[in-house]
Image (cartoon, rainbow, N blue to C red):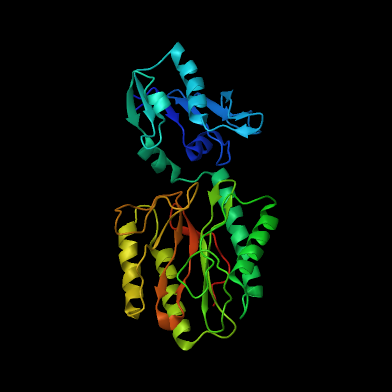
Amino acid sequence: MRAGDIPLAIVTQNEHVQWLSGARFRDALSAAAMLTAEGRLTLFAPSKEPPFAVADEVVVFEAKSLSTIRNDQAAQYSAAVLEHLRADSPSRIGCEYSSFPQHLAASVDVELIDVEPQLFKLRRRKERDELHLLRRAIEATGAMYGRAREIVAPGVSELTVFNELQAVAVEVLGEPLTATGNDYACAARGGPPRDRRAEAGELYILDLGPAYRGYFADNCRTLAVGQEPTTLQQQAWEQCTRVFPLVESSVRPGASCRELFERAKAILDESLPWKFNHHLGHGIGLAPHEAPHPNPFWDEQFAEGDVVAIEPGLYHEELRAGIRLENDYLVTADGVELLSDFPLEL
């Protein structure tokens, strides 16, 4: 902010409010935060002061009326923000262009500067408290896979698998999840659970991403249903696992995300006609997909503090229907730390 001559920034996305203040609000509620270049933070909280917030001042606005959630929360917090701005409104204000409310934009005669790209860039480096939450979410994922290995068998319903795994995660974390995860469809590349039962010989891709207090894990394991994997399934598994030593030997601050993708794709393309046709992974944090991007559509470098999910996969009908494996890594000063150290086997 100082370098860009931005004396004040106002953020209105709940993820950015949480990142700045530590206060997390559920999806049905809105919030805002105002940060000065001197480091003073004002939190605009819905309905009541949160139990925890790192803020110099907390201003409560009306987000509910007699317990009914209001639909005009943006107007309510905007009025509270404008009241604060009247005393000393700067000539330039940083904001998130994608979500800055018109209630504010139309009411201030200032130059608005988009600071959203900088916010996403700063969010890449996970601080100690963020790593604690991510590790807890990943721990819950490991317990979910432990339970999956006990119950995945011919005849099990995808809905039963979903319900059982969610229950395990809630027990581990001791509270409801803030997100449930990704893929629970058997003999498919992905998708939500269906009213369908697994069959012997199929592969069950379980791409799980429970979120704990707003922070997303993202792991994937593939299980063989009801029997030892076929020779072809085992070969596909072995090809996917070759990517992880590449990651662990080559990723460090400054390494190219695009180059990692290309090197991993070369390994997986040795198995054509089995297909690898998606990204190699993505960062995780307050969003399920964020930087860094091991993806040819981005040209980025890994940085210390990144937490990244790496997910090689191979898909083909003869595999019934494919394999995806996914590990989470923390990028350290001189390499990576594996955060999802639980079994990979089919």
Vertical placement of residue 131 versus 320, above or below: above
Could you tell whether 41 is left or right of 159 in the image?
left
Of residues 42 and 317, the one nearer the viewer is 317
> What residue is rendered at 36% in x and 40% in y?
117
Tell me where residue 18 appears, x and y as whole percent.
53, 37
Res 231 seen here: yes
Q: Among all residues in the image, which is located at the extreme bottom?
A: 231
Vertical placement of residue 274 versus 262, above or below: below
Res 1 seen here: no
> What residue is rendered at 60% in x and 83% in y?
226
> What residue is rendered at 48% in x and 29% in y?
74
Tell me where residue 150 appears, x and y as whole percent.
66, 74
Which corner quadrant of the image does residue 316 belong to?
Answer: bottom left
Which corner quadrant of the image does residue 170 belong to?
Answer: bottom right
Tell me where residue 219 appears, x and y as whole percent.
52, 62
Q: Among all residues in the image, which is located at the extreme top?
A: 87
The mark tally for this picture is: 0
Could you tell whether 72 is left or right of 3 in the image?
right
Of residues 292 and 30, the one nearer the viewer is 30
Please state, as top left, top right, bottom left or bottom right, where the C terminus lies in the image: bottom right
Please state, as top left, top right, bottom left or bottom right, where the N terminus lies in the image: top left
Vertical placement of residue 133 versus 4, above or below: below
Which corner quadrant of the image does residue 54 belong to?
Answer: top right
Tell me where residue 12 appears, x and y as whole percent.
46, 33
> What residue is rendered at 47% in x and 82% in y?
233
Of residues 188 and 119, the one nearer the viewer is 188
